[in-house]
Amino acid sequence: HIAQLTGAQAACVTTGAAAGIAISVAAVLAGTNPARVRALPQVTGIRAVALQAGHAVNFGAEVVQMIRMAGGDPKVVGSANAVSPELLAATLAGGEFAAYVHVLSHHCVQENMTSFTDALAICKHHNIPMIVDAAAEQDLNSYIAAGADLVTYSGGKAIAGPTSGFIAQGRALTPPKI
């Protein structure tokens, strides 16, 4: 039902958006390979997950911690007050990344950061899955419709429900090379 409401291919209920980030990173790293799932968080191979410096915030839990909990190796890009599209593109082109996490939140810097639209285009160009933390967003359709791979929402924020959340999956993901 959640997948239908969001226009996603699939959806997964979580305990909140923070758990959604960790589960999304784990999904990208392990895919449906049962051996990789069992190895989490100690997976081998490409584990780098890019995150703009202004998005590396703590809203009761650190975003980099959520990435680490799932086996990812957070790579913070730029500085807290500036990440240009050119810098993000050069970073993603210059290394092997399993995913990119984009945080849409009043807790983090949005000014002078690479926008969602530009980051999505860069991720698509480099074939890097984009995970969107849309915890407090009310629009449940636009990020999947735009092409984001995984979008996590908080049930306790804009949806005004109990402590909960969910992940919407935009397309089937292929785990990174081992």
Image (cartoon, rainbow, N blue to C red):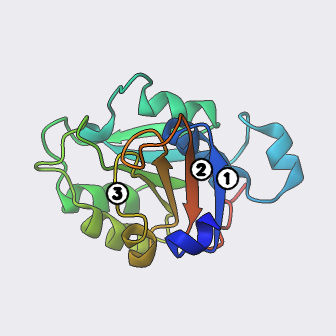
Q: Residue at x 37, y 71 (%)?
A: 142
Q: Residue at x 25, y 34 (%)?
A: 107
Q: Nearer the viewer, residue 2 or 170?
A: 2
* Nearest-to-viewer mark from 3 and 2: 3
Does residue 135 lie above or below 173 as drawn? above
**Marks 3 and 1: in contact by CB < 8 Å?**
no
Q: Which residue is drawn at 64% across and 36% down?
A: 71
CA gap between label 2 and label 1 equals 5 Å
Q: Which mark is residue 69?
A: none
Q: In which quarter of the image is the N terminus?
A: bottom right
**Marks 1 and 2: in contact by CB < 8 Å?**
yes
Q: Residue 24 carries which label?
A: 2
Q: Residue at x 75, y 38 (%)?
A: 40
Tag 3: amino acid? Gln
Q: How many numbered circles are shown? A: 3
Tag 2: amino acid? Ser
Point out the residue furthest to the front here.
161
Q: Is residue 96 visible?
A: no
Q: What element carries label 3?
A: loop
Left or right of 45, for residue 50:
left
Residue 7 position within the rendered picture, expressed as x and y whole percent measured from the top left: 52, 76
- Specify the quadrant of the image occupied by residue 11: bottom right
Q: Mark 1 points at which residue?
A: 27
Q: Which mark is residue 138?
A: 3
Neighbour tally class for label 1: few under 14, some 14-19, many 20 plus, Cα within 10 Å? many
Q: Nearer the viewer, residue 118 or 137?
A: 137
Residue 165 position within the rendered picture, expressed as x and y whole percent measured from the top left: 55, 45
Q: What element carries label 2?
A: helix
Neighbour tally class for label 2: few under 14, some 14-19, many 20 plus, Cα within 10 Å? many
Left or right of 28, for residue 85:
left
CA gap between label 3 and label 2 equals 20 Å
